[in-house]
Image (spheres, helix red, strand yellow):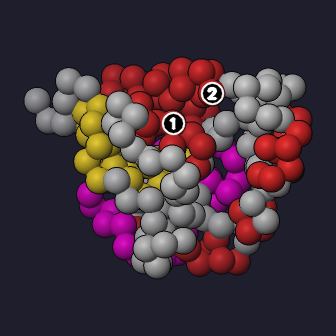
Amino acid sequence: MTNTVLGLLRHGQTDWNIDFRLQGTTDIELNQIGIDQAKRAGKLIVGSEWDVLLSSPLSRALDTARIVAAAAELPAPIIEPLLLERAFGAAEGLTYAEYREQFPEGMVVPDGETIPELAARAARLLEHIAATYPGQRVLAVSHGAFIRKAIKLASDGKFPPDGERFGNASLSTLIHSTRWNILDYAPHTLGGPKAD
């Protein structure tokens, strides 16, 4: 049986990324750097190595997916709601410093998605990919917090290390035979500097 591969590509940069603001499900568009990152990623991704392209419905991910599809000659992206970013509820729009101050660790954010809820959704996505696309190579455009949780699940908590951020337009890859494992952990921006 052929293994299933899942590439998790983070969307390109937005202005809120620059300001270290929690975006969550707020629909913030790519900025020009983000568009350029998506174009560069599309040139580096070999379209023939992927069978399916999925995307979160948020415009920063969907626009990244469309740009990558055009550059890498991939089929148009299929919207997959499970790839949506973690909902930060009342904390969306706050900087990380403001978030930590207003919502100390363990405090529930009104209308936010808890870490256990995010983990459950990431597990559903991994199950869905394995069941729906067996033996295929699936490229999925998503978001930092969601990708972080999916990788944590697939690596049994080994990756990512605490405090390590995923660069915009970074691509890490998982593989599934009987369970999900890390194939390539690469948190840096494709075609960009290693530390970002």
**Which amino acid, mark 1?**
Lys
> What residue sits 61% from the left and 33% below the top?
81
Quadrant of the image containing the C terminus: bottom right
Question: Which residue is labeled 1 in the image?
Answer: 149
Point out residue 74 in the picture as x, y percentages from the top left corner: 40, 59
**Which amino acid, mark 2?**
Ile
Residue stretch in magenta: 38-66
- Is residue 55 located in the magenta-colored stretch of the structure? yes
> What residue sits 79% from the left and 24% below the top?
108
Q: Principal SS element in the magenta part?
A: helix
Point out residue 20 in the picture as x, y percentages from the top left corner: 75, 60
Q: Quadrant of residue 92?
A: top right
Q: Residue furthest left?
A: 1
Number of numbered discs visible in the structure rendering? 2
Q: In the shown orientation, is residue 155 left or right of residue 87?
A: left
Foreground pick, 114 / 169: 114
Q: Are marks 2 and 1 in contact (CB under 8 Å)?
A: yes
Foreground pick, 128 / 195: 195
Point out residue 66 in the picture as x, y percentages from the top left corner: 56, 60
Q: In the shown orientation, is residue 89 left or right of residue 33?
A: right
> What residue sits 62% from the left and 27% below the top?
115
Q: Is residue 195 visible?
A: yes
- Is 7 drawn above or below residue 30 in the view shown? above
> What residue sits 63% from the left and 73% below the top?
35
Question: Which residue is labeled 2 in the image?
Answer: 115
- Is 186 drawn above or below residue 79 in the view shown? below
Foreground pick, 20 / 10: 20
Q: Quadrant of residue 63?
A: bottom right
